[in-house]
Image: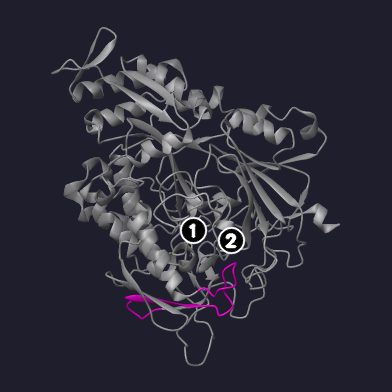
């Protein structure tokens, strides 16, 4: 994953193909040290460390981070409650991503992976030195237990690993996964991504003498095999992790020069502005700023002026990441089922005015579900992309073949009035009329109204102007911000009219596409199909992406899917930047060259105090 500490939302979407045999042992020539999607692995068997790390980075110092909301569980498997930040510090995975390759990973708990030519199975061989914090070896039974319980208890994994039919122990250190779909080159790789938990610990008794239950939330400090352990916590408020001196994997190649802080503490804040004040005051060491106005005007204070706080604008994490940030109408609600209604909602969004008055012209309007990558569609379909679209020609609008997708453009009063007039016409075609100051259903007389549900007040400044625009065409759009726990519960159960969401995409989309857009996930609680998309053309194109045999085929299939999703007007596209804004107290050092596709924070950074 791009950063095992800060990009977990992205990690679940990374998809890879397998490549480069390793010279692992004479009797198992099929085992490989790693996996790659484009070309060969950069690092050969026997490599010492990743190029972007400082292998001599000192260990020590304390890192103070922040998180929003609250937490009520340390259970990393269960999709229930609010899992505490930083749990990836405690648990290892089978494979670990290299941040200087677009899609490559290497053995962490597993020393190698093997699969037949038809990729009907994948076998992982565990490292003999891999151990839990209590000194017990990590076993195939642990891997099987972790996989089965993750798939049983977490709808995301249920979808992500839908084609993995089971796992079995096939050697003292070997575990083999079986697939019901052959030639799916991403399946072996994504099996390297889920966190492995200790079977013996979860099936044992807790301090109270009662059996533990992995199907329930818990605030008992959990045991893992990772570099850190839970050292102290205040429920819902803070958690402190400490580096384990006895960590089994501190010297293996994928870990050299990483995990450099002696302790990592997360403090939770209920308000993003208060969280920033925590950073300003020095109670938080690092800040990733996602508010354009604050980045432009909010650092006029002594520590930022005199250099004690450093600020940087970096493209690294977004070089291989596409983003769809959007307002998402819930099509499980009858009022949003008509495509013309959804299109009309986009015409009421005046991005150009917001960008000028609120965002300091820092953003670009999103116009693709793979925005910012080579997978984004543009112009008219050609070549293989056109062939794929012709296969679903009877299931998609004819305009896909004749008219490139564009967002409405406003920014001045005349253009905005024209857009609102067009929105009214679309509503009229969908069976609505303006009566007085209300948009109502022509047959029932019911007013068109809905609630925009948000997870943070910071989003209100970009949403309230949109609600005001909708009122100009007779639509009562109300903005409601709720606490993170309530927001999580409501989105998991699809209990909303419209939400604000961000889907992160890698340049190697795969199984997660079904969870995002597929019919099978439309009514499965906990899925990320927030719009409720159930489109036969989308369903037909998703397997084309997953089973693509080469880069060109994957690109063509992704572009075709992009066009169909855009033509369905399933979201109101918002905006995004091509760089990431970070600010941090001058307490750290880092390699001169950050990894190509990641900030490397805090994985490869270290404390200046420890260096003295």
> Residue at horizontal 58%, vertical 61%?
99
Label 2 belongs to which residue? Answer: 99
**Quarter in which the C terminus is drawn:** bottom right
**Crowding near pointer 2: few (<14 within 10 Å), some, many (20+)?**
many
- Magenta stretch: dominant secondary structure: loop
Label 1 belongs to which residue? Answer: 209
Q: Is residue 277 left or right of residue 538?
A: right
Q: Is residue 333 left or right of residue 529?
A: left
> Residue at horizontal 27%, vertical 12%?
438
Q: Element type at marker 2?
A: loop
Rendered view: 433 above or below 204? above
Q: Quadrant of residue 257?
A: bottom right
**Crowding near pointer 1: few (<14 within 10 Å), some, many (20+)?**
few
Q: Which residues are magenta?
A: 115-138
Q: CB under 8 Å between callouts 2 and 1?
A: no
View extreme (left): residue = 443
View extreme (right): residue = 612
> How far apart, in angstroms, are the residues tagged by discs 2 and 1?
43 Å
Q: Quadrant of residue 134?
A: bottom right
Asked if residue 589 is among those painted magenta in the image, a careful observer would answer no
Q: Quadrant of residue 498?
A: top left
Q: Element type at marker 1?
A: loop
């Amino acid at each position: 994953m791009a950063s095992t500490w800060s990009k977990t939302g992205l990690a679940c979407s990374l998809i890879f193909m397998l490549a480069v045999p390793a010279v692992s042992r004479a009797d198992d020539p099929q085992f490989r040290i790693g996996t790659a999607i484009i070309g060969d692995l950069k690092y050969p068997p026997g490599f010492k460390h990743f190029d972007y790390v400082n292998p001599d980075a000192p260990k020590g110092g304390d890192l103070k981070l922040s998180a929003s909301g609250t937490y009520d569980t340390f259970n990393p498997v269960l999709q229930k409650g609010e899992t505490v930040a930083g749990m990836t510090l405690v648990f290892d995975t089978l494979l670990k991503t290299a941040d200087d390759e677009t899609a490559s990973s290497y053995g962490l708990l597993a020393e190698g992976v093997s699969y037949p030519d038809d990729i009907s199975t994948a076998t992982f061989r565990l490292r003999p030195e891999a151990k839990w914090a209590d000194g017990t070896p990590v076993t195939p039974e642990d891997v099987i237990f972790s996989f089965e319980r993750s798939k049983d208890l977490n709808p995301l994994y249920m979808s992500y690993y839908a084609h993995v039919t089971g796992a079995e122990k096939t050697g003292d250190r070997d575990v083999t996964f079986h697939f019901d779909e052959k030639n799916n080159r991403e399946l072996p790789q994504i099996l390297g991504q889920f966190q492995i938990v200790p079977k013996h610990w979860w099936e044992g008794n807790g301090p109270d003498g009662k059996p533990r239950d992995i199907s329930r939330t818990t605030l008992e400090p959990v045991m893992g095999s990772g570099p850190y352990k839970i050292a102290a916590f205040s429920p819902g408020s803070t958690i402190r992790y400490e580096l384990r001196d006895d960590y089994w994997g501190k010297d293996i190649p994928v870990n050299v020069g990483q995990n450099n802080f002696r302790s990592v503490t997360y403090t939770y804040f209920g308000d993003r502005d208060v969280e920033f004040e925590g950073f300003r005051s020095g109670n938080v060491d690092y800040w990733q700023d996602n508010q354009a106005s604050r980045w432009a005007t909010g650092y006029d204070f002594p520590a930022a002026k005199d250099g004690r706080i450093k600020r940087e604008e970096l493209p690294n994490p977004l070089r291989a990441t596409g983003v769809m940030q959007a307002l998402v109408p819930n099509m499980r609600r009858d009022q949003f089922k008509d495509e013309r209604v959804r299109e009309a909602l986009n015409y009421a969004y005046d991005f150009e005015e917001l960008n000028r008055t609120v965002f300091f012209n820092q953003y670009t309007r999103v116009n693709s579900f793979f925005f910012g990558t080579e997978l984004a569609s543009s112009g008219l379909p050609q070549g293989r992309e056109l062939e794929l679209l012709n296969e679903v020609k009877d299931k998609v609008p004819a305009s896909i073949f004749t008219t490139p997708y564009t967002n409405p453009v406003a920014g001045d009063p005349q253009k905005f009035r024209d857009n609102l007039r067009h929105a009214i016409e679309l509503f009229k075609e969908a069976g609505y009329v303006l009566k007085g100051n209300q948009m109502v259903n022509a047959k029932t007389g019911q007013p068109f109204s809905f609630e925009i549900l948000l997870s943070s007040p910071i989003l209100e400044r970009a949403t309230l102007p949109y609600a005001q625009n909708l009122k100009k065409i007779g639509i009562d759009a109300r903005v409601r911000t709720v606490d993170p726990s309530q927001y999580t519960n409501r989105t998991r159960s699809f209990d909303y009219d419209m939400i604000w969401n961000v889907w992160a995409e890698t340049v190697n989309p795969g199984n997660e596409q079904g969870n995002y857009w597929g019919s099978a996930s439309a009514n499965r609680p906990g899925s990320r199909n927030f719009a409720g998309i159930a489109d036969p053309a989308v369903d037909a194109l998703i397997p084309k992406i997953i089973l693509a045999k080469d880069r060109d085929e994957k690109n063509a299939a992704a572009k075709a899917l992009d066009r169909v999703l855009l033509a369905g007007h399933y979201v109101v596209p918002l905006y995004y930047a091509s760089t990431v804004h970070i600010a941090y107290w001058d307490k750290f050092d880092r390699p001169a060259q950050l990894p190509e596709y990641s900030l490397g924070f805090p994985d490869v950074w270290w404390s200046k105090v420890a260096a003295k």
